[in-house]
Amino acid sequence: MKKLFLCFLIATSFQLHSQDIIIQGKSLPLNPEYSVKFNSYELYEIDVEEVRNKIVNSPRSGIDINLVLGHNSHLLQVNKFNVIKPNCKVRIATANGIIEVDPDPTIQTYRGYNANFGGREVAITIAKNYMSIMFGEGEETYYLEQISHEFINSSINSFVLYDSKGYKDSHVMKNPVESVEKAKQ
């Protein structure tokens, strides 16, 4: 009986720690147009809505995500972390002045850790037709985000991967890293 229980315990522990979701990025060729914004970057195609549906419909609150980008795989272990407080309002500047609206109910945020060797914190934000992932590995922080609509041929499934030193400072287009760096000054 003890051996049967031990076998059951081992089998269920492997099941509990298996990857829930695989995000497979299909490598895309570099585009010289993006060199205006990035020093060093990689481009990927990822089906945003497929990923969002997998994450939103995950049966567990803790999710293991295997993020596969080219030849690199990153095991991201995340938990839902609601950064939007109840009764929060979003202020939007319009031609008729500032209006307040409810936040998009599809926005979900997750926090966790990169389980790779030297892995650090992870943050994921997803919403309808939107995904952004930040993960630390070693001494570097990486950003996987949708290609800005300012670029020609961008789509919701086109992503750029860059590190914290991989972007060029620009007064025209800002990305999350630039906004953080400017706030620190």
Image: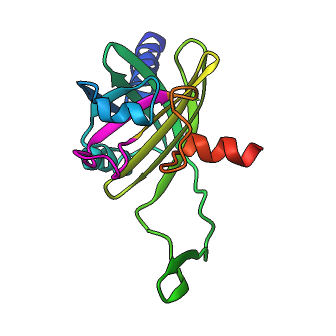
Q: Which residues are magenta?
A: 146-162
In this rendering, would 30 be left or right of 105?
A: left
Residue 24 percent location from the top left of the image: 28, 28
32 or 158, nearer to the observer: 32
Labels in figure, total: 0
Which residue does the image show at 63% across and 67% down from the upper left?
Answer: 85
Which residue does the image show at 52% across and 48% down from the upper left?
Answer: 174
Q: Looking at the magenta stretch, what is its main secondary structure?
A: loop
> The N terminus is located in which quarter?
top left
Residue positioned most to the bottom: 96
| Colour mode of the rendering | rainbow
10 or 120, nearer to the observer: 120
The answer to whether residue 20 shows anywhere in this view is no
Residue 78 percent location from the top left of the image: 52, 37
Task: Examine the structure image and report whether residue 17 is included in the region drawn in magenta.
Answer: no
Residue 160 percent location from the top left of the image: 37, 34
> The C terminus is located in which quarter?
top right
50 or 41, nearer to the observer: 41
119 or 98, nearer to the observer: 98
In this rendering, would 22 be left or right of 180?
A: left
Report which quarter residue 112 is drawn in.
top right
Which residue does the image show at 38% across and 46% down from the upper left?
Answer: 59
Picture layout, residue 72 above or below residue 55: above
Task: Examine the structure image and report whether residue 147 is included in the region drawn in magenta.
Answer: yes
Which residue does the image show at 39% across and 30% down from the upper left?
Answer: 35
Residue 96 percent location from the top left of the image: 49, 89
The answer to whether residue 24 shows anywhere in this view is yes
